[in-house]
Image (cartoon, helix red, strand yellow):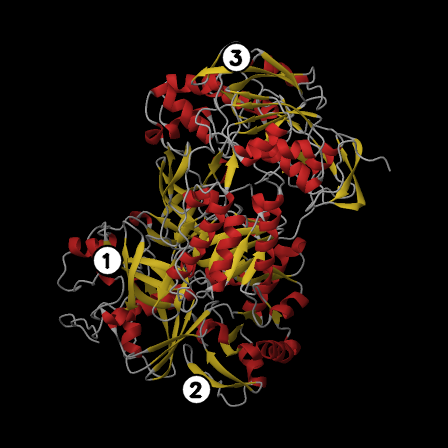
Amino acid sequence: MKRAPFRLPAQIGERIDRSRTVSFSFEGRTYDGLAGDTIASALASHGVRVLSRSFKYHRPRGALTMAGQDANTLVQLTEEPNVLADTTPITGGLEVRGQNYSGSLAWDRDAWLNAVGRFLPVGFYYKAFYKPLGAWRRWEPVIRARAGLGEVNLDTAHRYYDKAYGFSDVAVIGAGPAGLSAALEAARAGLDVLLVEENPVLGGSLTYARFDADGALGRQRLAELASAVRAESRITVMTGAVCQGLLTENWLPIIQGNRLHKVRARQVVLATGSVEQPVVFRNNDAPGVMQGSAAQRLIRHYGVRPGRRAVVVTGNADGYGVALDLLDAGIEVAGILDLRATPPHEERTDAVRARNVAIYPRYAPWEARRSARGILKGLSAAPIVGHGKCEPADVRLECDLLCMSIGYAPTAQLLHYAGGSVVYDRAAATFAIKSAPAGVIPAGSLDGAYDLETAIADGRRAGMQAAAGLGAPSRGEPPAVRGKNASGWNHPWPIFPHPRGKDFVDFDEDLQVKDIRNAIAEGYDHIELLKRFSTAGMGPSQGRHTALSLARITAEATGRELEIIGATTARPPYSAEKFGHLAGRGFEPVRLSAMHHRHLEAGAEMMPAGLWLRPAYYGPKDRREAAIREEVEAVRANVGLIDVSTLGGLDVRGPDAAEFLNRMYTFAYANQQVGRARYVLMCDQTGAIIDDGVACRFHDWHFYVTATTGGADRVYQTMLWHNAQWRLDVDITNATAAYAGVNLAGPRSREVLAKLATDVDLSAPAFPYMGVRMGTVAGIPARLLRVGFVGELGYEIHVPASAGEALWDALLWAGAPLGIKPFGVEAQRLLRLEKGHIIVGQDTDGETHPYMADMGWAIAKKKPFFVGARAIEAQMKRPLQRKLVGFTLVDPAEPPPEECHLVIREGAIVGRVTSAAFSPSLSRVIGLAFVPPEQTEPGARFSIKVAGGRMIEAQVVKPPFLDPNNARQEG
Amino acid sequence: MKIMPCPLNGPRNITEFACAGEVRVMPDPAAASDAAWADYVFMETNGAGIVREWWCHLPTSYWFIAERNTVTDEIVHTYPAGDVFSARRDFAPKPGGGA
């Protein structure tokens, strides 16, 4: 195999496996990389420099950080847009394309946008496309197509994501020199430590940077620290894991692979490091211009030569470390531009001097020269004469690589999320930490420790501080850390505006120096306003490379101090995250009754009811209407069986049980006889109806109360809340899940039950309507309730949930000779409507009190108190606004109106339909509706506006529509 | 995410809890005017500073009282409702009313 032209010989600590070749394609062409390569490193090994095009001007872009911290390397995969090419590993057959171009990546048809850039000032879209009204709607698709990022592939297969929960005494974010040291100290103090590193291996800058002349120091420290961490059993290491936030009380969302870890830490050490900053000059975005650390990462991590002939722009000793790495990799260094007047004597600097590299003190990059395809081919350099000012360029250097090493800005996102802040530090010439909340301890270069030994000492200090914060025994005095926020690491003014622009402050959003100045001139001179108006720092890089330059330019333009200008804050997430990570596994809890599988076997169409699934009807969807009608007929003429396990069941026990129900429900329960059931209607404190059911008295001190399917939990909690204040002597148990229940209903239900109930006398005098009994049914202990929701002779039978299926089977077996039919919720709705029974929440709303629902009969007026009584009393001092009535349609041929169709009088809305259906038993449409009080007398007519705006006539009927004397259910 | 120190269940994620508003003592329904009752039902003080609130641990349906600083969102203290509502509450019978 032909070796990739830019691949170096083996490097110590490289992440690639030279024995395994991986083929992938980029822009339709096949390339060979090595296992462990990222998309960007594999392409760099073949000299491919352009990865994508920029968002606004479609300028070619290449690797900038090699650390996943910029938008230059966003590429499109077949199944995923906006993938970071510099951190995404290649896999066999991967298909990669660039983004933001029309035609081809190399020759973009929309590159003309670059030429008309001066007509696209900041705020252009806000200003140009908002008039006339509606213009934005026309322009938006055009602009989005030009400026949008990648394309979403809607055919992408579903992938698996999940979540995990974790706890640790100390979480250390970042496993560079400071983070490793902090983790060791905390673990040695006896604490459980979680060490989170976004790279695939430990070490941070130790894995790529050069700290001394021969490069041995970094390797040595890495070996020491990493092996000590691996040997420490108290440290859990997560690599390839990104901490996305630092939320209230140290709650950390950490993404690793397809899993979101939610970790609670008692103390958090932030050792997130710092980001190398770009130099602002003309064409500083050309592919080939990159951070010094990016070139080092290419060499050390991937064994890739980042160019053939390089120039280094620097203002500190690290830049000379970069130059040494380039020289060792066989790259010619055409020159070093040092922004300082006199580069001081220092180990790495002197080593470069000794290798006869041309050093240009007090020289700035003035203009990167680009090839026809927009790629770096040379540099014009100019002598610095003042603050960002240069004399005419007098040095021309040919180069295909330009490394920028002029300083750092702290990676302070997590600190910001936690409520900490940074402020510009004049001595350090960058942002420094101003405040950190309790339990959050910054360390390392995040906290201004740029020197290696200082960072290690600072990490130890932070680990000890975390241990002390948790009360761990002291292991000696923390090391004195000197030299933080020292000068010499960061150049105070690496900004060299060019008269012809293209001096980018923000690469994501293609913002130049003049864009920022213009926005300030327009009045957006507060850093946060400026950010929002100019969009500086709002792209995928989130201001990592922009915030410092933005503050500097603002300070210069406004004449205010940098300390006053401040820094823009950051908000989670730290990096892009997928909806899959947030969603995790589809987790929608569903409750199934004990008879669920019998319903499925019987062909039931299931419907959601609260968290439950209930049979809507039995039969195929295309037989829906017929199935419901047959079920209704079975109950009216013969016998039917419905699963009512989903109803709430509450056991209220104790000497105050009756008093308690008296207070919770509107009716009177003090004199209710044992063995009898009574209707219950619950209101909230505003008097609105919130639930109903029946209370069965099995003992002086014991009521079994049912609640609606959706309301059971709320009823239970409301009861507990009230009694927390009343302190009555009752015990309340939510027994909903403990019982399965059925309603056996129809004229022949007694006949069916008689076959199974051996010890309950079912005769009408012995077990009358609204009677309750305990006994056995088919040998199963049961609570039997003779209630009539559907208006027929019927028995609700509640048994332990474990016996629910057996009960169901026994009843169907016993009823089989009679032609028993299971019926669903739809049939039940119709059956109860024929009786005029309300469904709470359907026939009532948040303002319906009992009188409004025509249920004044359910209120015991003489008792001292019930929840809602006082509010109902106050409302009844005023005339009713509306009342619930039964109705039928004047034209018998008219189809039923739908729920929430409006009742109209003289053009005004005066009410609405709450339930309506065609009743097969009555051969006409029946329903319930809210109407004005003066239209409630039987026979009164009102108009309903139905679909299409048509008006139909309805007539008030006093419910129940069927069997007004209740002979059927009471027989 | 905040942690709520539940008097029954210990420290738990706050998503397991529901807040039911300020702790207020129900006025005597027989004596309170309509306006006073409406004030009790509908109006909250919404004060800045430490307030007493009802909280419910939903999985266990346990109600308790939390003192929370609404300015700093600090949970200062939590305790069982019985610490405040320590005695049985009864309502006076209505004139001519039964049980």
A706 or A920: nearer the viewer: A706
A257 or A586: nearer the viewer: A257
The residue that label 2 is drawn on is A766
N-terminal of the pair, mark 3 or mark 1, is 3
Furthest-top residue in this view: A392
Q: Tell me which residue sits at (71%, 26%) in the image.
A: A308
Q: Residues within 10 Å of mark 1 (few under 14, many from 20)?
A: many
Q: Splitting the image into 4 quarters, where does residue A848 fall?
A: bottom left
The quadrant the N terminus of chain A occupies is top right
Q: Is residue A123 visible?
A: no
| Mark toward the viewer: 3 or 1 | 3
The residue that label 3 is drawn on is A118
Marks 2 and 1 on same chain: yes
| Mark toward the viewer: 2 or 1 | 1
Q: How many numbered tags mark residues here? A: 3
B77 or A843: nearer the viewer: B77
Horizontally, residue A969 falls left or right of residue A292, namely left
The residue that label 1 is drawn on is A871
Q: Are marks 3 and 1 in contact (CB under 8 Å)?
A: no
Position of residue A908 measured from the top left corner of the image (x, y, whole percent) = 35, 37
Q: Chain of mark 1?
A: A
Q: Tell me which residue sits at (71%, 22%) in the image.
A: A106
Q: CA distance from mark 3 to mark 1?
A: 68 Å
